[in-house]
Amino acid sequence: MSDPAASDRIALAGSERTIPAGAVERGACDPNETATATVVVRAKAPSAPRAAELAALEPGQREYLTRAEFAEQFGASESDIAAVERFASDSGLTVVSSSRARRSVELSGTIGALAAAFGADLRSYQLGDQEFRGRKGTLSVPAALAPLVTGVFGLDNRPQARSQFRRRVRSAVAAASAFTPVQVATAYAFPTGFDGSGQTIALLELGGGFTTADLKTYFSGLGIAEPSVSSVSVDAGKNAPAGDPNSADSEVLLDIEVAAAIAPGAKIVVYFAPNTDQGFLDAVTTIVHDTKHAPTILSISWGGPEATWTSQAFTNFDAAFADAATLGMTVLVAAGDSGSSDGETDGLAHVDFPASSPHVLACGGTQLVADGAAIESETVWNGGTSDGATGGGISDAFDLPAWQQTANVPPSVNAGARVGRGVPDVAGNADPQSGYDIYVDGSAGVVGGTSAVAPLWAALVARLNQAVGKQLGFLNPTLYASPSALDDIVSGNNGAYTAGPGWDACTGLGSPNGARLLALVTSPPAPVPPPAPSSP
């Protein structure tokens, strides 16, 4: 076996990591322990330009590639995949799987072999009650391999994301009424006569699980036929309910019950993966390129502050979301539940990722007061430290997208006043004090959070797709060009940012009005007026 350390090596751009504050080193990792890593390979051609071309068209005019066509045009080349596989063999590693469409090669081997192959010093750390394998600094690969590789994930297996749900906290303050998902959809005038038939909604989960008993009880109580719900394992993740409503089980059931109650005709496929950067990315790429279930919509209710991610994660997740847009998939992501700080304690404003990716629809939160189908008031969700607040702000990782250029996105409140990607794009009911009745682990409860808003919008998109008769795909440019299709939220704040007329860093363009959105996506494009005659 050749020694990969003997060759000239190049630091892998974007791979630098630091150890989380408060983590205690416990020593070197066992070099004989087995682990996996995912190597992401460059595309034959990036899909983002194609996604931009599609986004410039009216939704009804877009023609999408099949997944097979995508793999041929935008997947990895066979030669690049083969080069990584040879490197793995030379490094004493085993190839678990390779995918040209996902541009991924999964490798398995001992910690010692993986560390040597990628120039990593892997150590064991303790942070609170969690022990993880961590690294600091950059990874490296042989010079000949460096141009081919866009990221290596899995050597460091720290928990990467958190769920974005909030259970209602009883307090001296009288709580607003809770709603069923159907009642929220009615208040937001979701188009009637459509149930999401023909659509498949993918839900990405990094923990927790569900039982069929809970689903039977919940949907029976709503008078809705039990929906089609199945699960998929990614990287050995699995449907593993903890039996505790305060666990990630509430995230999983919230996602399923909101999406399926509003779009009961849609198929719901829940993808379970480990809560690591490798598990998260592998779940995204698996969903986007899943030819068996062929999801049309992806809802993600997990994320973390941009400051906790690597640059290679930004690059590769965003590329995967651009792939989704090219295939006509709409991706909805919760914007976070910890206000403008996103839970960080450095005194700065932060936004959540992957909500900050410019190829997803980021979903912020409101407090909704409604009587039947009539909305009485709607303000920014900000329940303080006990009940949380909607995330939102200005990205430090991504520049201002073209479709946000006219939205009057303000500069960041941080030093330097950076103008970048504004988060969120849209909003919906999220305050646990006006939350959703759900059923989890044998008990009823009220849950909110921007975790509820992503599946809420996912169900709306399922109805709209059904109404239009095709996938709407990446909606951001369409919504920003017609903001009056949403209900502007002009009152409240999430800490550093305040709502006002037009787009804001609390609720984006506003909450949905399903009737106006249906009219927007079904109306033919306005005719282009002829040029005015020139003056004689």
Image (cartoon, rainbow, N blue to C red):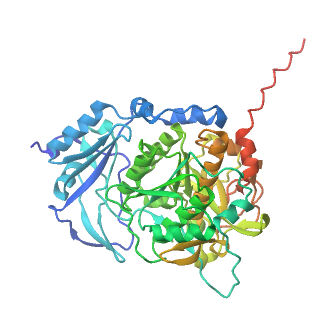
Can you see residue 415?
Answer: no
Which residue reaches farthest bottom? Answer: 172
Q: Nearer the viewer, residue 140 or 427?
A: 427
Location of residue 263 by image quarter = bottom right
Q: Residue at x 81, y 21 (%)?
A: 530
The structure residue drawn at horizontal position 81% and vertical position 25%, both measured from the top left corner, is 529
Q: Is residue 275 above or below residue 168?
A: above
Of 185 and 140, which appears nearest the observer?
A: 185
Is 215 situated above or below 71? Answer: below
Residue 3 placement, left or right of 169: left
Q: Measured from the top left, where is residue 522 in percent x and y?
A: 72, 39
Q: Nearer the viewer, residue 520 or 279?
A: 520
If the image is split into quadrants, where does the C terminus sit? top right
Instruction: From the viewer's perspective, tell me whether residue 148 is left or right of residue 308.
Output: left
Q: Is residue 442 above or below residue 280?
A: below
Give how far across and how far down residue 69 sits, in percent: 44, 30
Residue at the left extreme of this rendering: 1
Q: How many marks?
A: 0
